[in-house]
Image: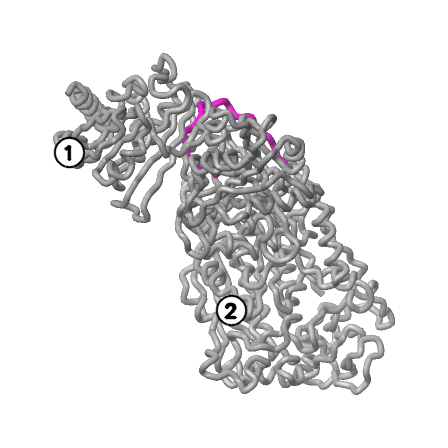
Amino acid sequence: MSQANTRPKPFLLPDYCKGCGRCVHVCVQGCISFTQEINPLTGMVPVTLDLAKCTGCGLCIEACPEPYGLKAMEAGESFELQDPATLFGARRSTAPEPVDIPGRVIPMPSSEPLVIKGTYAAALGALMAGCRHVFGYPITPSTEGAELMAKLLPKMDGFYLQAVSEVATVYHMYGCGGAGLPSLTFTSSPGLSLMLEGISYMIAAELPGVFIDIMRGGPGLGNIGPDQGDVKLACRGLGHGNTHAITLMPSTPQEMLDLTYLAFELSFKYRNPVMVMADGYLGQMTGKVKLPDHMVEPGLPAWGVYGDLNHRGNLNSSVFLDEATMETRNLKLFDKYEQMKSEARAECFQAEDAEILLVACNTPSRASKGAAQKLREQGARVGLFRPITIWPFPIEQLLPLLPRLKQIVVVEASKNQIEDELRLALSHAGITDPPPITHVQRYGGILPKENEVVAHVQNLLGRA
Amino acid sequence: MSDAFYGTFDRHNEGKGLKGHTTHYCAGCGHGLAHKYLAEAIDELGIQDQTVTVNPVGCAAFLHFYLDTGHSSTAHGRAAATAVGHKVANPDAMVVCYQGDGDLAAIGLAETIATAQLGLPITVLFINNAIYGMTGGQMAPTTLMGQITTTSPDGRDRLTGGPIRMAELIAQLDGPVYVERVALFSPAERKKAKRAIKKALLMQKERRGYAFVEVLAECPTHFKTTPEKAMEWVKEQMVPIYPLGVKKDANFEPWFEMPKPTFDPATFLKAVGASSEKPAGFCKGFPTHIHATDISLKLAGSGGDGAQTVAMLIAKAAINEGFDGTHIPAYGPESRGGTSYADVHVALEEVHNPASPNPDIFVAFNAPSLAKFGHTVRPGGTIIYDSAVAKDVKPVDPTVRVVGVPFTDIAAGLGKMVVKNIVALGALQAATEIFPQETLLATLRDTLKEKAALIPLNEKAFAMGAEAAREAMKK
């Protein structure tokens, strides 16, 4: 009995007690009881302690669900000290201020060009940008990229994980990107639809990650033909909320590599996902691909939730219940979207003196290039404007060409999705009387062909 | 009080007032105890700096108010997938997936099962209170039969399913090392709960595998009762449906190890097969006798004819010679046996349009392909077709040269049908002289360098195809 008396007895700050009574039921001595008195500060009814019979068994302390609820009173502590800072110790988090661990640029010996398909080129671009974590769910026509990654990553001590779904894929990226590391997935249109929720969360929590979307014919299951029907998702529909992401539109296997590489840089620069969108043809297309002259070993950003002392205090989150805080959060994202506009890129081909300007991305831009050349041979002043970023739209690069233009022809494998980006950009730039805009479009897994573009322009010229 | 809790809950109302030291949970809620046992286990195992908790959508969405660890707050149902991302990014991280019943057993079921079966060392705490607490007391997958909720106002019945036993389900899988169901309604059960949470973390720390602890928890608010009666309800109503105890305790040796990624240029170049050796060139110049700057080819046949391989060889040969080359394959939906077309371009500087709507050179492996594309060949172009299988050649532009070579017969004569496409390549070379023989043979040898035994046969097929084309053109 004398030994029992030396065990610490419980102490409770009534303000921190919600009166659940888990402690009341475990005390065999009946030291703790419910009261009827409402605590004026909390509106709760705390329990009261009468420790005359307390044996210090500790069961009440173990039963208390509140971190600052029942506390064992150590020898020498005084009941008088009711300041929590004294009672619980003025303990601050011992986590240090996190610091950036910089990455490293590693020079590469020069090598002969490879002859590889677009998806492979994108995979190599990712590896050279320092990505060693790839997640994905197989979907035609993007699978070759994932297959190559599954083969190459183990050789570089990286990790490929086939996820249970596209929904899971994007959260593997949320976790890996959230830890501060580069990650990638290959997908195709129906898969992108499934990933949109997670992309919204990644944008909200400001996490990097690169999405390679090899677009196929839709809507629905559609087919595996080449298409551009995901442009509106990338530009206007990245999940719920006010979301945007830089969206790159390669047109050659070489660009599949270069733009994927760039995507990682941009993704970490802005702490935002980046989309690389190609049509199915480009994914499958084999061409000449030169490797960059350096490779990146990524560092570890200060903000990552990596699971070490340096990053212990960090939190990735998109939940801000207070509306004003959430509005501020939105404004911060909008600032970032404004800064992203400086990343707009475009290629002009025979555009300086053009009167008819073709606007096209991905493989249709190459059919358009061919058409522009053919039409030039016939004496028509036709050029090509190729947005390399479809969001942000490269409007600054387009504006100087406008005064000379008599016609704009948008060539795309979707219903107005690229054209709408152009029209929106013109409208936001205050262009109220742009040249007439017509289009050459194919749908359902078919790309517009060179001769269709030629015929359309010839028709326009005949009418003019 | 555990050191793993913040000294002040600064993220809870900025730590001001009472919220700086109290949780947001209702009186009698089970979450507080689960948090406490988790915090104590983190202390006791000395893993605070490594710990990343993955916080779900549900009442525990604000775990980051309380625990002084890394936090990743994620979408409803996606905690398990997020946890995997954290674990593979840093295998030394102690990843704790803290989930409620909607998150884990409804919307996230696929991720829950897949992650458990994957078996990476992750610790999952599943708080089962048979109700959706945060959204206001709706039916959960774990709601008991007859239990009244806002979405089962007359009590859960057969048409709305039955309570799902997650611990038993998870324990059946091969991935998990340790699965236990615990409760919080008595000192003895609380002791077991605390021990189970610590053991689940230990399984991760020791790299043994995935561990899952299901905690039967009280939600007095939505049970519409007192904390005391809520405990009784868990004991009397839930436990018979959700039996407590260890469901799996396997003896996994520590196995989990992930190497640190390498960024060594030589390893990379070897893995991708890049070489610094310039391939030998044999061309004297661009084959302008076909087109001044950009030659387009089409090859068409059935899957298995090898049209794509030949297309690839031509594009590769072009690039080896310092030109540009592209190849676009198009297949039918079947993996084998369907239609298989290839568009190839060889350009002096840059291929503008890689499609071949009007090819300069067309190779047909069968009659349907010949009929489909023969007429698209541009005037002055060349058609090479398998005369062993395509007998009727429809009339084409009179300036188009049509060369019939029995690819199939020659390949059969060599005893290997698979070299039919190389016969065609030889015929194409002889009929068009797009590249010198050596250019194509060097590319062919390079492609076969890991199957060197096949090189002589392929060279023979190439030579016989070329010879047959020359013979055919004499006629």
Question: Against B93, is B267 above or below?
Answer: above
Rendered residue at 54%/32% (across/down): A384
Quickly name the residue at label 1: B388
Q: Nearer the viewer, residue A407 or B53?
A: A407
Instruction: Indicate left or right for B236 with A222 as reference.
Output: right
- Whether the magenta-drawn stretch holds residue A123 is answered as yes
Q: Chain of mark 1?
A: B
Rendered residue at 46%/25% (across/down): B350
Three-letter amino acid code of the residue under disc 2: Ala
Describe the element under mark 2 as helix, strand or loop.
Answer: helix
For discs 1 and 2, the disc positioned in front in the rendered view: 1
Q: Nearer the viewer, residue A82 or A382?
A: A382
* Same subunit, tags 1 and 2: yes
Compare marks 1 and 2 and give the one earlier in the sequence: 2
Q: Chain of mark 2?
A: B
Magenta residues? Answer: A103-124
Q: Nearer the viewer, residue A78 or B179?
A: B179
Residue B106: which numbered mark, if any?
2
> What colour scheme has been applied to the protein in the rendered image?
one colour
